[in-house]
Image (cartoon, rainbow, N blue to C red):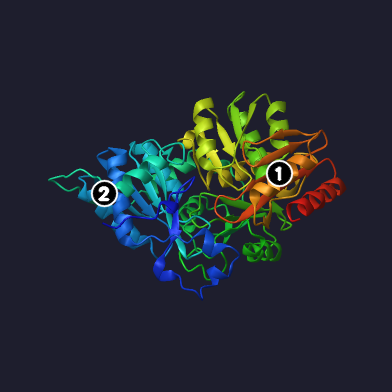
Amino acid sequence: MAVPDPKVFRNYDIRALVPELVDESSEYFGKVGAKDTYQAPLTPDEVEQIGKGLAEFFGERQVAIGYDARTSGPTWSAALAKGLTSQGVDVLDIGRATTDTIYYVSGKYQIPGVEITASHSPKELNGMKIVRAGAKVVGMGSGMEDLRDLVISGQFKSVNTPGVVTQKDVLPEYIDHLMGFIDVTEVKPFKIVADAGNGVGGLPATEIFRRMPQLSVSTLFFEPDGTFPNHGPNPFERENIEQLVEAVIEQKADFGVAWDGDADRVFFVDEIGNPIPGDFITTLVARHFLALHPGASIVYDLRASWAVADWVKRLGGKPIAERVGHSYIKQTMRAQNGAFGGEVSGHYYFRDHYYADNGFIPLLSVLQMLTEQNIPMSKLVASLGAYFVSGEINSTVKDTDAVIKRLKERYHDAEQHFRDGISIEYPDWHFNVRPSANDPLVRLNLEARSQADMEAKRDEVLALIRA
């Protein structure tokens, strides 16, 4: 019996090395701490074992499977389907698809779903994002521990009739679902540069743009390629958006948009080529949805700029801060019936998308906002007011607990919270420092009332972190 390493079952998903893609000379192992962080591999036989465990875990008759552009995706999909069908479960195979497409299928058809993806991680990894029927997330605290223990135990029921695999192209109906969020005919002509980064974001994006002929779209790296030959699959790292920024400036585009590897995160740059922080996009989309749903609850992650809560309160909504991570945001949105939620990391969640994250509804919302307000993207962002944020700054550390202790002691006179790392609140500045869920890092997000104060406090806190 092939038993996976328990370490592959993580807070938000399953994540592991693909053994055939990694050796000691791999560029991936050159990254600090990578070998220690992702020392657990997954083989196809172990993926099949996870499929068997999922059959027992879900207790449903049918499960949907999709996979992103990674080279191991088809093999893992077949292995997962083999495990599920061996336990009598039917598989709806939607093939290569974005993660938010799986969420749509799970919500629309009320069946569990698995997207085979390692999201924005390097090409040497793969994994699984798992939802119950109705796109209800599975993570630590919401079933991941139970799934882990079940898979490792290997105690599965015997069945006489195996399940069957049915293939289905759901992209057309998924695009119909997305286009229902705006009036396409009202959107003005815009010039856009779109970068799919050789992930799967180009699949829905191509169809969206086809239905909006008034747009002039220049596409970058829309061909899915799991080796990510042009840049890494994480557009929130500056090195991965350089080509997008250059193209926006050279082509005098109205804005640029990019997706991560599985396209459940989206990133924007304005017409000048300036990256737009995720919490500012959260604020803009929150304003848009509060106009549609007056008084609604808006959920945001606790790293965010004051801009989010300020604007939600100003517009009569209810701002709700939650710890970082899609499993936490989604659970709170369901509990509070939140119309919209957003994270600094570029995950944006929608009640009318089964409370799940989506990388394309924000793009449609931005197009409608720019149409209605008839101002450039930079002016749209400036309409939020003056907020001075550091952006997320990573630091490699040996002992995260020691870092948190130093910060707690140094800023003992502040209001302190420990829901996710440490959050420090003063009247004129605040910050959060939290350990990464995937890497040997801590992540700093800081904001102050002026650019000078932000830079001074940023450097002060970084010095403590890196001491």
Counting residues from the start of the chain, the first of labels 1 and 2 encountered is: 2
Return the residue found at the far bottom.
Answer: 25
Image coordinates of residue 312 in percent, x first then y, are 68, 30
Image coordinates of residue 100 in percent, x first then y, are 46, 46
Left or right of residue 92: residue 161: left
Q: Amino acid at mark 1?
A: Lys
Res 43 label: none
Check disc 2 and report the residue beneath it.
84
Tally of marks: 2
- Of badges 1 and 2, the one in the foreground is 1
User: Residue at point 36% right, 37% down?
Assistant: 133
Image coordinates of residue 431 in percent, x first then y, are 73, 42
- Name the foreground residue: 373 vs 320: 320
Return the residue found at the far right.
Answer: 452
User: Residue at point 45% right, 70% down?
Assistant: 22
Residue 230, placed above or below residue 279: below
Q: Can residue 224 be seen?
A: yes
Q: CB atoms at circles 1 and 2 under 8 Å apart? A: no
Left or right of residue 388: residue 267: left
The local secondary structure at tag 2 comes to helix
Check disc 1 and report the residue beneath it.
405
Mark 1, residues whose alpha carbon is within 10 Å: few (<14), some, or many (≥20)? few
| Quadrant showing the N terminus | bottom left
- Name the foreground residue: 224 vs 279: 279
CA distance separating discs 1 and 2: 46 Å
Q: Quadrant of residue 293?
A: top right
Residue 378, placed above or below residue 107: below
User: Residue at point 39% right, 70% down?
Assistant: 20
Q: Amino acid at mark 2?
A: Leu
Q: Quadrant of residue 269?
A: bottom right
Residue 355, placed above or below residue 73: above
